[in-house]
Amino acid sequence: MRACLLSGRLACLMAGAFLVAAAPDAGADTLRPWSLPPADSCRPEGGLRGLAGQQDAPTVALQSGETFAVNQLETLRNFLPAAVWEYRDRFFYEGMRLEIGACFADYSPPGFFQAATVANAGKTRLTEKGGLEGYVAGLPFAPGEIDPSDPRAALQWAWDFELRYQGAGFWGKFRTSDMVGRAGRAEPFMGEIFKVQTAFRADRVDGKYEVSGSKGNHWVAGGQLFEPFDARHYAWRQFRSVDHMTDPRRSDDVHAYLPNFRRVRRVSGADVEGLYMPSFSVGVVQPTALAVMGGGVDGAGGGGGAGGIGGAAAAASSITTKRSGFEGLELRPLLHEFRLLGVQDVVAPINAATPAYPKDPEREFGPWGLSFASDRWDLRRAVVIEGRAKGTRSGDQAARFVLHLDAQTLAPLYYASWDARDEQIDVGLHVGRWSEAREDYRAWPGDADRPVRVIDSVGAAYANVMEDGGWRRESWEIVSTPPDDGTVKRQLSVSNLTKRR
């Protein structure tokens, strides 16, 4: 870091705010284990490399455009998380055609987000209990500045993940299919979902990094269901206060419109750690009514299925909530103790090319219904962190999870969780899509020339190891630029939930 002191802290922060490909002759003292190889360098290091005594891992020469069938999968073994490899039959299948995409491509966020990281450097502080104070916008901790020997390095990565660049949130249609066993049928439910980031918005410099009407909320999410028939018109809003960054007890405010009662009811958000959304379970009860039972906390920070309706609604319910389909997109770092496991070069569908729902509702997903293998998989460098719940977890609640984060974009790549007995619950992968490769991508309102440069979450597949099943989410056309301000204002309103019919 001596070079940073000589050239000035601002220049150093700008260079380290977001990881870029390291120059071949870069000095070792300026690099971090997660520094990226040169773009288009297709000689990745395989296997998880722990930070203590970082060892050389086997190097395999790959090539963009190279394809792999299932009988060639052994070549990629070191470039997949151990949990994914163990359950590879769920994610890879006979007849698949996995294509290697770009090698360590530059998917860094736009300049205005990087500028916010630099402008606010040094203002963010970790509290004694792991909370965040003084955060304004951008990344709270520039990756180039995170010290791998710091015992709180993993916690810094966790906060970076939660506050990573995601445009202004996301908007779009989705389909989630819940599978029961290999021979089980997929029972899909469809709808639309959104998340509006209302605070810490790097594109809102003139508005003090806030959206008008944010009312102290970090973000607001919601949506409505179209299918199955008995869940039609069910809609919800979830408000996450900025207080969650310092107070682990601060639960979300969740409101739901219940078609059977034609009214909005408040939903308990005590167990909702990630994005709330009711889901549709097959094989538990007959799919004849709306899912309204409660559940537990999802350890990945994405457990929308962890919140239930309860109360009067339960009298008219018969379907148990499951995972939401949007796991792993949100995390509440205050609820976990974190450990930095290391770095791993992986292949992952971070910039997929094969359309899914709603553009192609007939896409094939293999015998388990969980495979995105016949697609384009990039080579990426991942930071691997482990989270352990601070509170007591029971049943199928995640007491421990391992998360593979893309070192440059902070996008989730892979996830696996275990219960309090250290028995595996599930393992999953996330599918992304690069905005700059999409034609007719929605521009920023009022600023068509502003770059977007975001990885949209267009899919996910989780194998439920405990139940020998899993679920799959498709949201191929989701975007991260907001609609006009008038539409956003209506989306933030609870009263708008009553206008379902």
Image (cartoon, helix red, strand yellow):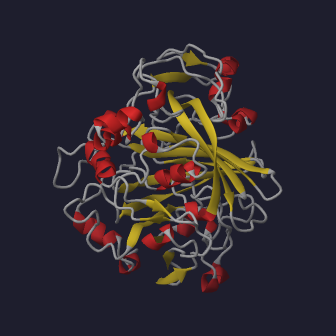
Q: What residue appears at the point 41 percent right and 61 percent down from the top-left corner? A: 195
Q: Is residue 427 visible?
A: yes
Q: Nearer the viewer, residue 267 or 157?
A: 157
Q: Quadrant of the N terminus?
A: top left
Q: Which residue is located at x 36 percent, y 36 percent? A: 4
Image quarter of the C terminus? bottom left
Above or below residue 232? Residue 138 is above
Question: In the displayed image of the protein, which residue is found farthest to the right?
Answer: 421
- Residue 330 screen position, x and y as percent: 52, 57
Q: Where is residue 200, by image quadrant?
A: bottom left
Which residue is drawn at the image coordinates 38% and 38% (left, top)?
16
The answer to whether residue 438 shows anywhere in this view is no
- Count all numbered tags in the image, as a single digit: 0
Residue 414 on image: x %, y %: 60, 42
Name the spot of residue 308 as percent of width and height, x first: 62, 73
Q: Residue at x 57, y 54 (%)?
A: 327
Can you give x and y, in whole percent of width and height, for residue 332 in the image?
55, 62
Q: Is residue 120 above or below residue 458?
A: below
Towards the viewer: 137 or 428:
137
Q: Is residue 279 left or right of residue 353?
A: right
In the image, 27 versus 337, the foreground residue is 27
Indicate whether 23 appears above or below 371: above
Asked if residue 493 lies left or right of residue 451, the reply is right
